[in-house]
Image (cartoon, rainbow, N blue to C red):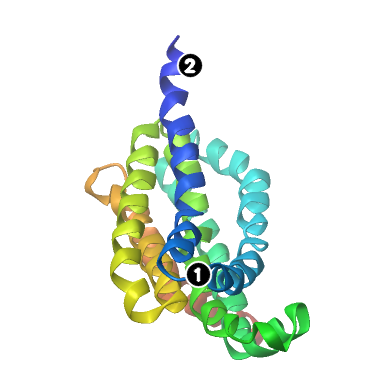
Amino acid sequence: MSLLKDSLPLILSGLVVLVYMRIDQIMIKHMIDNVSVGYYSAAVRICEALYFIPVTLCNSIFPAIVNAKNVSEAFYNNRMQKLYDVLAWLAIGIAVPVTIFSNLIIQILFGKEFATASPVLTIYIWAGVAVFLGVASSQYLINENLTKLAFIRSFVGMILNVALNFFLIPKFGINGAAIATLVSYSIIAFVPSYHKNYKTQLKLMLRSLSFISLVRYLNNIRLSKKK
C-alpha cells in the first residue's frame, strides 16, 4: 500500500507529461490547420529523438550517485553537480549546431517543402537543455521520495504550456508553439525550488548552466599540462 501511495504521483505525472507533450500539436490543429501540425511535428520529432540521451545516461550513472549519499551529503551533491554539468554541456553542444544548420537538417530529413519547420527546430531544440537537466532532477526527486513535487512540476508545466499556446499561437503561429514549449520546459525545471530540499539542486543546475564547472575543468587541464 505504501509503495502504491509513493508511486501514484509518478503515475499521474507520467500521464500529465503525455498530455502536455502533445497538447501543442492539438492546439495548432484547432487554431491553425493540419498542414501546420505537419511542419511542427517534423521539427518536434528531431528534438524528441535526442531525449533518449539523458535517460540512458541517468539510468547508467544514477546508481553510483545514490551510493554516494551513503558516504556524505557533500559527495552526493558533488556527483549530482557532475551529472548536471555533463547533461548541460551535451544539450548545449547539440543545440548550437542544430540552430546553425536547422534549415539544412530539415531539408535533408524532410525535403525543401518542409522549410517552414526550420525556425521551429531552431527554437524547440533549446528546450532540450531544460529536458536534459529535468531528467536528472527527476531522478533526484524519486531518490529523495519527493514524488509529489515531480507531479506538481509536470502539472504546472502543462497548465503553463496551454496558457502560453493560447497567447502565442495566434501571434506567431507554429513558432509561437515552439516558444511556449521552450519557456514552459525551462520554468518547470525550477518549479520545485520552493522546497528546501530542492534549493541545493537549483543551485547546482544554475551552476552547470553558468559554465563555472566547465571553466574550472578547462583550467585544471591547462594547469596539469604545465606540470
What is the distance, in whole Å, between disc 1 and disc 2 at their CAs?
Answer: 44 Å
Q: Give the secondary structure at mark 2.
A: helix
Horizontal side of residue 128 vs 185, given as left or right: right
- Depth check: give the residue in front, 78 or 142: 142
Report x, y in % for residue 20: 44, 51
Amino acid identity at mark 2: Leu
Report x, y in % for residue 55: 62, 50
Q: Give the secondary structure at mark 1.
A: loop
Label 2 sits on residue: 3
The residue carrying pointer 1 sits among few (fewer than 14), some (14 to 19) or many (20 or more) residues within 10 Å by Cα, namely few
The answer to whether 109 is drawn above or below residue 156 in the figure is: below
* Residue 26 visible at all: yes
Amino acid identity at mark 1: Asp
Report x, y in % for residue 162: 34, 57
- Depth check: give the residue in front, 198 or 23: 23
- Depth check: give the residue in front, 175 or 78: 175
Report x, y in % for residue 148: 35, 33
Q: Which mark is residue 33?
A: 1
